[in-house]
Image (tube, rainbow, N blue to C red):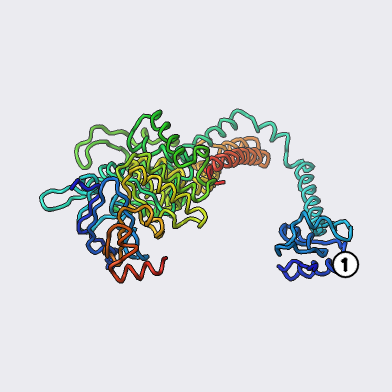
Amino acid sequence: MSAAMVELRGVHKSFGSLEVLRGVDLRVDPGEVTVILGPSGSGKSTLLRTVNHLEKVDSGSISVDGELVGYRRIGDRLHELPEREILRQRTKIGFVFQNFNLFPHLTVHQNVTEAPLSAQRRPKAEVNALATRLLERVGLADKARSYPGRLSGGQQQRVAIARALALEPKVILFDEPTSALDPELVGEVLDTVKDLAGSGTTMIVVTHEVGFAREVADTVVFMDEGRIVEQGPPSEVLDAPRHERTRLFLSKVL
Amino acid sequence: MPVEFSGTDGGDTHGAAAKAAKAPPARVRTHRGYGGNRVLLASTSRTATLPAGGAPADRGDTRETRTGEPPPKVITTRHPWRWVAAAGIAVLLAMAASALITNPAWEWEVVGEYLFAPSVLRAVVFTLELTALGIVFGFLLGTVLALMRLSGNPLLNSVAWGYIALFRSVPLILQLLFWYNLALLYPRISFGVPFGPAFFDIGTMDLIGPVTAAALGLALHQAAYAAEIVRAGLLSVDHGQREAAAALGIPRARQLFRIILPQAMRSIVPTAGNEIIGLVKGTSVVYIMALPELFYQVQVIYNRNGRVIALLLVATIWYLVMTSVMSVAQHYIERYYGRGRG
């Protein structure tokens, strides 16, 4: 068995008295696409946010590419890393937000080049060329000098994907990338994500698009009430779910 | 079968449309600002057929009326009272101008004589210097205070809160007098290890002269206000922006100066502009320290020659010029920070 790209072990997380994650174990192999489905409030977004330490965990461990995220193990204890170290780790983990969160005062090109320049300190010429290439890849080469506010939601999300790719991360996390989009714009974003999946990028995608999961996922994970109910290839989880909870959810969204 | 259709939104316009439809070609009067309705009324003021698909005929179709009559003209609502009000204001303005020009007591020739007098120009420059010092150091300290207020450290937070409360509560003129008279409280100031040995000390009067005292007083007072302005600006930036910057691994300081502050500037600049203009005029308080800023300088001159009104006018004109230039500058700064927000 080869080393996992992302590995979560016994992850617990509470917001106050509300326990959102109740012991989650998950393993994502290199090049694999994992799609997390589940009803609202099942903890899937929180789970995704713990992977790049946007949320701290209460217990359990998360590692990406063999390195613990956000903590250092000393004996049997995990000590939280200084912020500088966490920021460095995050450059290996791309994150695409539901609301895009592009920087509105920077051009599309600057949005893409900002992190490689300031977080990775790569040479300007190289980063500029990279940004041009990535914007071409998401079909927005002609928008490089526009500000995000001039773009449609679908175009903004594609810029956000290019921005995440610019760090050349080991894994990309998508947090409901199409939920804030008008229905007719969902397709262009999903196509971009599919294209990435085809190129062998390791991805974890939280989404409500069951059709997308069926088409792209290597593994579908169904979560409910802070736990993984079942996981497996789409043909099993989506077409022949073993758990009543999964069947009920699928009957509602399909 | 020909189908008649008419506008259905708005009771008033609906009535007008129905009337127009009965007796084409009617002259339809509409209210300005109802652009959508105007188009609708023009096309509903005569009968039209629905095409086979059932969709309403578009404007191109309705232009050819079946009866061959020209489409009715649209006349917008007239506003006769606006003209009456404008005439009234014009008369009042003329009266004011006449009162300013014809009354010799304004002494316009004296105003002209002193407007560019070297001592007045020097006072204008000094006023601008005091303003610049107050604003630059006020906003630097204010930004630090704002960051302290937003920090998770309760001591930093409450110290900043206390500073803001204190310096906003005491009138500026009192604060200036305290700084001016600091030497009465602490004749000498020493630098060294806190509660330990001093490396050197210096007379307070030598360290804090009247100009320093004035600039210090203005800046420390301004900082309290600037802190709240900057804090409000930082809070106005969407939380997702900081999160996105953090997720991209952008270093902490860079997050603040490249991502958060430039966006905060959009709400900081208009209020800060107010503050700067306020401070230009606020420097006149410094006259109590006998410093030759604009207001003090004109007082000196009119105490000598007795031309009080003319010299107050000189000061007024200069304050107007300074604040007007700043308002224009503010417009361009706002436009710069508003970029990307069509």
Pick whichever, B57 or B273, lies toward us.
B57
Residue A45 drawn at (x, y percent): 34, 58
Q: Amino acid at mark 1?
A: Ala
Residue B238 located left or right of residue A75: right
Badge 1, how many Cα within 10 Å: few under 14, some, many 20+? few
- Numbered marks: total: 1
Residue A112 drawn at (x, y percent): 42, 39
Residue B229 located left or right of residue B78: left
Residue A38 in view, yes or no: yes
Residue B13 located left or right of residue B212: right
Residue at the outermost left position:
A75
Residue B209 drawn at (x, y percent): 41, 35
Residue B3 located left or right of residue A48: right
Q: Quadrant of residue B38?
A: bottom right
Quadrant in the picture for the N terminus of chain B:
bottom right
Residue B122 drawn at (x, y percent): 56, 30
Q: Quadrant of residue A248?
A: bottom left
Residue drawn at x 75%, y 64% as measured from the top left = B50
Q: Secondary structure at mark 1?
A: loop
**Residue that label 1 marks:** B23
Pick whichever, B164 or A218, lies toward us.
A218
Q: Quadrant of residue A25?
A: bottom left
Residue B174 in view, yes or no: no
Pick whichever, A240 or B170, lies toward us.
A240
Residue drawn at x 32%, y 50% as measured from the top left = A33
Which chain is home to disc 1? Answer: B
Pick whichever, A234 or B15, lies toward us.
A234
